[in-house]
Image (spheres, grey):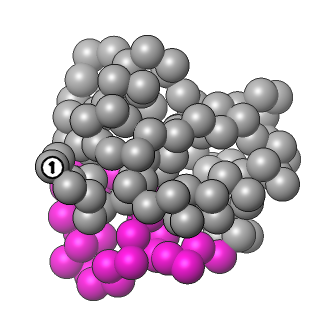
Amino acid sequence: MPKLMSKVLIIDDSPVDTLDLAGILGRNGYTVISADGAELGLQVARDQQPDIVLMDIVMPGLNGFQATRLLTQGASTRHIPVVMVSNKDQQTDRVWGARQGARGYVTKPVRERELIGLIENLIP
């Protein structure tokens, strides 16, 4: 069960993937905010202070690995857990995501129970 009014930031350049994730989160009682790229997502994370970030990897400009590193090392955002959400399903991507500070990794298409379980474990 989500914590009361837990806020999830989706950073993904795909409107379809963002809509899918927002649907899953909304059905499960989460407040959703989104950004359509990493640069904007970093600013939204600093301004809105979400409870957790769902981060795509492949985006134009700054990629998800770079943005995750910036979030997890930033003074005002290091407390926010980041979960990588990607089409990439290689072990090397999972390891690299963890090295950037990601606390979880799920592949698209996202399985609802897996995602919600991970979020519930990461939000304090």
- Say above or below: 52 vs 75: below
Question: Callout 1: 10 Å neighbours few (<14), some, many (20+)?
Answer: few
List x then y, in percent, for residue 85.
44, 64
Q: Which residues are magenta?
A: 83-111
Looking at the picture, tell me which residue is in the foreground, 17 or 93.
Answer: 17
Residue tagged 1 = 61
SS at circle 1: loop
Looking at the picture, tell me which residue is in the foreground, 9 or 20.
Answer: 20
Q: Is residue 31 left or right of residue 1?
A: left
Q: Is residue 59 left or right of residue 56?
A: left
Residue drawn where x is 48% and y is 70% of the image: 106
Residue drawn where x is 42% and y is 25% of the image: 44
Q: Is residue 96 left or right of residue 4?
A: left
List x then y, in percent, for residue 94.
29, 70
List x then y, in percent, for residue 97.
26, 60
Residue placed furthest toward the bottom: 90
Residue type at mark 1 is: Gly
Q: Which quarter of the picture shows residue 95? A: bottom left
- Say above or below: 12 vs 5: below
List x then y, in percent, for residue 26.
78, 49
Q: Is residue 33 magenta?
A: no
- Say above or below: 88 vs 8: below
Residue drawn where x is 39% and y is 78% of the image: 87
Looking at the picture, tell me which residue is in the foreground, 104 or 25.
Answer: 25
Q: Is residue 53 visible?
A: no
